[in-house]
Image: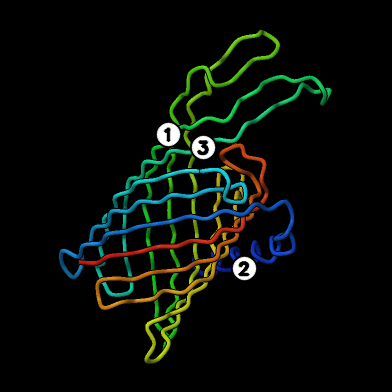
Amino acid sequence: MYIPKRLSSLFAAAVVALPSLAEGSDFGMWYGVEVSHKLTQQWSFDANAELSNRNNTKTLDSWQLGLEASYKPVKWLKLSAGYYLKDKNRQEKLTMHSDGQTPNKWTPGYWGLRHRVKVSLTGSIDWGRFSFSLRERYQLTYRPEADGKKYDVDNDEWDPVKAKTSHTLRSRLQVDYNIPRCKIDPFAGVEMFNGKDGIEKMRYQVGVVYKWRKQHSFDLTYRYQHYYDSADDDDNTGEHLIGLGYKYKF
């Protein structure tokens, strides 16, 4: 069966990455706002914005705007697709020749736009007050060419950073718990990011959601991300993140 194989892969990758959680890690925060509108029992639309920082919150990392549409043919299954515009603050990078001592290429830090499309399929089941969900998401990211951002030391000239398209399959397992007569509900999850060369990143998160009336909800999340191979060519191997979010439904 496909789902059991995916769950076993998630569990195996999580076990392998956990021992290195404290090694080479950074700390940052991200903030998110989302507005959701339910048109019918099956269709809904979301608009969202996100801002994040890194380098122990000293450096602005990225901002993002997104639009997403979702369709639920049955109660336990949801299909969604969305477009996201992201501006990423790329870290400085220096590559060396084969001798390991002579500089080859130098790319100073700069801001670069990315265009991202996500298509997701989420299945969920309820067991008592627990809710389990498995989401499979295909993510396509296009980074346009950036002129004059990379310095060629040997030829003493500035070269463009070439355009790049990346494809990622994201698999997320999450469990939510509904506390009786309480407006605060906890959740926990693990997500695996697979690229063309295998696992690129593992994401672990725990958090709580506070619901105020029927329209408003606030969430507080702790997230750890372990990088096997960064698609953005950054050198960090892990990140500890605190997230604050707000969602409005109408």
Amino acid at circle 2: Phe
**Real-space Cα separation, disc 3 to disc 2, in angstroms:** 32 Å
Residue of label 2: 11
**Image-based side of 90 in relation to 126, left or right:** right
Front: mark 3 or 2: 3
Quarter placement of the C terminus: bottom left
Q: Quadrant of residue 33?
A: bottom left
Residue of label 3: 89
Residue visible at 82% across and 26% down in the picture: 100
**Real-space Cα separation, disc 2 to disc 1, in angstroms:** 34 Å
Amino acid at circle 1: Leu
**Real-space Cα separation, disc 3 to disc 1, in angstroms:** 9 Å
Front: mark 2 or 1: 1
Residue of label 1: 113
**Image-based side of 40 in relation to 152, left or right:** left
Place of residue 211 in the rendered image (x, y in percent of width and height, measured from the top left):
34, 76
Q: Are marks 3 and 2 in contact (CB under 8 Å)?
A: no
Amino acid at circle 3: Asn
N-terminal of the pair, mark 2 or mark 1, is: 2
Coloring scheme of the render?
A: rainbow
**Image-based side of 22 in relation to 160, left or right:** right
- Label 2 neighbourhood size at 10 Å, few (<14), some (14-19), many (20+)? some
